[in-house]
Each structure stands twice: as C-alpha cells, then as structure tokens.
Image (cartoon, grey):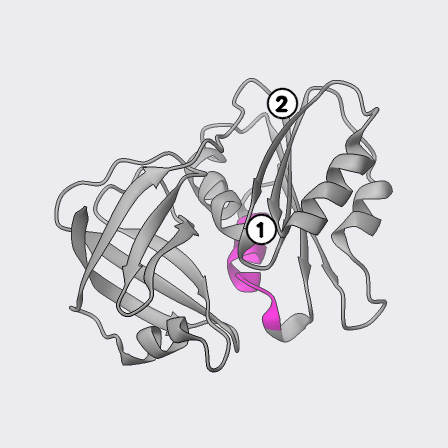
Amino acid sequence: MKSGHISHIRPITPEVFELSIEPDSPFDFEAGQHVALEVPLVGPRYFSIASDSRNKSQFRLLVRAPNEHPLRTFLLSSKPGDQVSFNGPGGKMRFQSQCQNHLFVATGTGLSPFFSMLESHIQENPKSHFEFLLGFSNLDNQLYKDELEKYESQFKNLSCEVVYSREGQKTYVTDALRNYKWKTNSAVYLCGQKEMIESCISILKGVQDITVVRETY
C-alpha cells in the first residue's frame, strides 16, 4: 500500500471530480495505467490515471460520483492535505508507439487513460496523428473541453470529435466509428462501458492493419 495526500480537488462537471494526489515517494507509472484508491467505508476503487506519466510527484484522477453515491460523500468531505492510501499502478493498457496513427475512443471518464497518453506522448511524436472520438451525454457533462481545445491549437497532429447521446443529434461514438475513414498502421484505443466496447469491437472486425487496445470500466 502506498500513501500520499490530496493536493487539489474540484468538481469539473455535475457528476465528475478532478482529484490530484501527491504521493509520499516518487510514483512511476505508464500512461494508460490505473490505481486502486482506498475510499473510507467503501474500500478500493479503481481509477485510470489522467495525467502526464513524466510527472512522478503528482498524479490526477477523474472520479465520477453521482448524487447519493458514497464516493461523492468522500469527495465533498475531502480537502487538500488529507492523507490517502492507494495501490498500483496496474493495468495492461499502453501507448502503441510502433503505430503512426492513434484513435482514442471513449465515453465519460473513459477519457482518463487517453488524456494521460496525450500529455505523455504527443510532444515526442510530432509525426504521429492523434485523434479523439469522445462521447458524453451532453455539453454540461463533457470532460476537459477547454484542455483538449488548447492542445488542438498547439498541435496540428491532434484532432477531436465529440458527440452527445442526449443532446442535439443524439449521436453515439459507435455511430461516428462506423463512418471513420481508416488510415493504415493505426492503433485504436477503447475505454468505456462493456456494451460500448463490444459494439466497437464488432465494428472493427474486418478492418485491416490496426492494433486494438481496450479497457472496460
């Protein structure tokens, strides 16, 4: 079990909090991995790390905590300086550096491991193309909108498409994936609920020259 303290905590949508933790000793992880955070009266809860893997002194989590959920009680009662315990890192999801094109498909907080990959790898891969295909229920629940737009303005090899399932045209990421124009030597990263992952895998059958990496929450 590792220990650290909360350095920052803030709500970023009505249901999702950003939680930053400073470990008591340097914490090595790879973009795509997760930690198991010990939550009082709840037990361990697994969260993908959403920050730059080159920063060993702090890591960031996106925690979905709806109303009445025990996690929300924990987050609302926590403050900077509070001690926390966690295990990790764990998980097999990794950035596929051998590929030229990277398509990240996520819903909700499934963005977390991919935002870590973006921060960790885009600067050192200027000739690779990074594409995000993200699904949220509506604009109010979109995660890291400003941050992704800032990265898009800085890096010409990054593009983002966002769809909403309960607003506007009511589109799902699977709808957008069906219409995707495939590039050779591509890595496809999937993170979201089981049904979304299975639908994406079905769509990807028969697509040539891709590497698929997935994680279900």
The structure residue drawn at horizontal position 81% and vertical position 60%, both measured from the top left corner, is 171
* Residue located beneath label 2 in the image: 100
Write down the region rendered in magenta: 141-152
The structure residue drawn at horizontal position 32% and vertical position 70%, both measured from the top left corner, is 9
Tell whether 217 sits left or right of 123. right
Disc ID at residue 153:
1
Viewer-side residue, 15 vs 46: 46
* Spot occupied by residue 120 in the image (x, y as percentages of width and height): 42, 37
Tell whether 173 sits left or right of 153. right
Viewer-side residue, 32 vs 70: 70
* Spot occupied by residue 99 in the image (x, y as percentages of width and height): 60, 21
Q: Residues within 10 Å of mark 2 (few under 14, many from 20)?
A: some
Secondary structure state at the residue bearing disc 2: loop
Please, what is the dominant secondary structure of the magenta stretch? helix
In this view, the mark in front (1 or 2): 2
* Spot occupied by residue 157 in the image (x, y as percentages of width and height): 62, 36
Tell whether 15 sits left or right of 214. left
